[in-house]
Image (cartoon, rainbow, N blue to C red):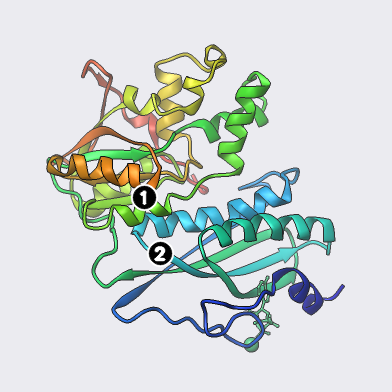
């Protein structure tokens, strides 16, 4: 099977929302009047972002999910995406599975594949997503103000638990591992929550490298600092509510590390003034996503951690995941 047959067979579907999709030199998008286009790219490299043994349908899901998560963090509505794919060989059962997982998530978000590139090489997947947001309404990293609450969506740290098991550093009972593995391989981009937070949140970021590091991006962009309740963050571990939770690393530093520096969560961290608490909780209910208040923005720069009793903890240990560190 040649390159063009492969594209036609697995990655060409009639464009419905876009004026022009796969097949010409460019695709064409038509954002509604008064809208800005939000654009983001994320690349997944075998051995670095995923294991060669991962189910291709799950990989297709995750490749798009991590990109939709960036749109969510901006409060943008997904429109379309492009897919640049480097493949070592044409493996049709792999391609069919990958396309199935990819399009299931794309269809759930009304986000169309409109173009891309296909080449032979080490397995590498790069998606660029396009979304739309009313001019001036995008959620940015730079809007946090002293006194704002710090919130987080969903659950934290479970993807990292699965990674630790794959690395052989931890053993978990099968049901608990399945939960952790699903969080790692099938992240849920919080698109509906991002949309519901427009006009409410002062700043937002999606969590790919760990809460402490990613919140740090908001703090620096906004010129502020924060105090976080590390116990409240650790309480977001989905595994902590599982019947087998006794098999998890013990409460305290080990769980703080999972929640604060785990990575691969694809949740949103965001800020909002205390007067907006009811509105944030309503946004969470409207989006069907749990939201939890775990800290406070302060004028003093830097990130400070406390436990549930308010006693200070050392924060330096929770640097974010860095591919070149
Ligand atoms: P060009 O030579 O102009 O770069 P290509 O020959 O690479 O174009 O691609 C032909 C068409 O197929 C283009 O419309 C391109 O966007 C699309 N395409 C290529 N690879 C993919 C892919 N993996 N998924 C979706 N569309 C793709
Ligand atoms: Mg061309």
Q: Nearer the viewer, residue 224 or 231?
A: 231
Q: Which residue is mark 2?
A: 77
**Could you tell whether 268 is left or right of 17 in the image?**
left
Residue shown at the point (39%, 24%) measured from the top left: 235
Q: CA distance from mark 1 to mark 2?
A: 11 Å
Q: Which element type, helix, strand or loop, lies under badge 1?
A: helix
Residue under numbered circle 1: 193
Question: Would residue 277 appear left or right of 40 to someone viewing this image?
Answer: left
Q: Is residue 77 above or below residue 216?
A: below
- Residue 252 is drawn in which quadrant? top left
x, y percentage for residue 169? 63, 23
The quadrant of the image that shows the N terminus is bottom right
Q: Which class describes the residues within 10 Å of circle 2: few (<14), some (14-19), or many (20+)?
A: many
Q: Looking at the rendered structure, which numbered label has been put on residue 299?
A: none
Going by the image, does 151 lie left or right of 325? left
Kindly give the residue lying farthest to the right in the view shown. Answer: 1
- Tags 1 and 2 touching, CB below 8 Å: no
Q: State ligand 2's quadrant.
A: bottom right
Q: Is mark 2 within 8 Å of ligand 1?
A: no
Above or below, 313 against 108 in this view is above
Query: How many numbered discs, if any?
Result: 2
Res. 255 visible in picture: yes
**Where residue 100 sits: x, y (%)?**
70, 57
Q: Give the quadrant of residue 310.
A: top left
């Amino acid at each position: 099977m040649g390159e063009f047959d492969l594209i036609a067979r697995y990655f060409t579907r009639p464009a419905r929302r876009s004026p022009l999709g796969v097949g010409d030199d460019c695709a064409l998008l038509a954002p509604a009047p008064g809208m800005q286009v939000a654009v983001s790219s994320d690349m997944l490299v075998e051995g670095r972002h995923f294991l060669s043994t991962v189910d291709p349908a799950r990989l297709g899901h995750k490749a798009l999910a991590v990109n939709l998560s960036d749109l969510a963090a901006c409060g943008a509505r997904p429109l379309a995406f492009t897919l640049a794919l480097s493949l070592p060989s044409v493996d049709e059962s792999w391609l069919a599975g990958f396309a199935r997982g990819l399009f299931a998530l794309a269809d759930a978000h009304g986000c169309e594949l409109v173009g891309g590139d296909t080449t032979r090489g080490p397995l590498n997947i790069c998606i660029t997503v396009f979304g739309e947001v009313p001019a001036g309404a995008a959620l940015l990293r730079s809007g946090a103000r002293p006194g704002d609450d710090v919130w987080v969506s969903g659950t934290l740290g479970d993807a990292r638990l699965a990674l630790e098991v794959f690395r052989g550093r931890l053993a978990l009972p099968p049901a608990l591992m399945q939960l952790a593995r699903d969080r790692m391989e099938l992240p849920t981009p919080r698109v509906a929550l991002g949309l519901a937070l427009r006009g409410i949140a002062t700043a937002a970021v999606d969590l790919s490298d760990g809460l402490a590091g990613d919140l740090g991006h908001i703090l620096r962009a906004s010129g502020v600092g924060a105090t976080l309740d590390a116990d409240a963050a650790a309480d977001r571990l989905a595994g902590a509510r599982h019947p087998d939770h006794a098999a998890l690393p013990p409460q305290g530093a080990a769980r703080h590390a999972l929640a604060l520096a785990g990575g691969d969560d694809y949740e949103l961290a965001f800020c909002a003034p205390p007067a907006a608490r009811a509105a944030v909780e309503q946004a969470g209910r409207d989006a069907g996503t749990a939201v939890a208040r775990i800290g406070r923005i302060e004028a003093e720069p830097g990130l400070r951690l406390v436990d549930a009793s308010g006693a200070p903890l050392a924060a330096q240990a929770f640097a974010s995941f860095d591919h070149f560190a």
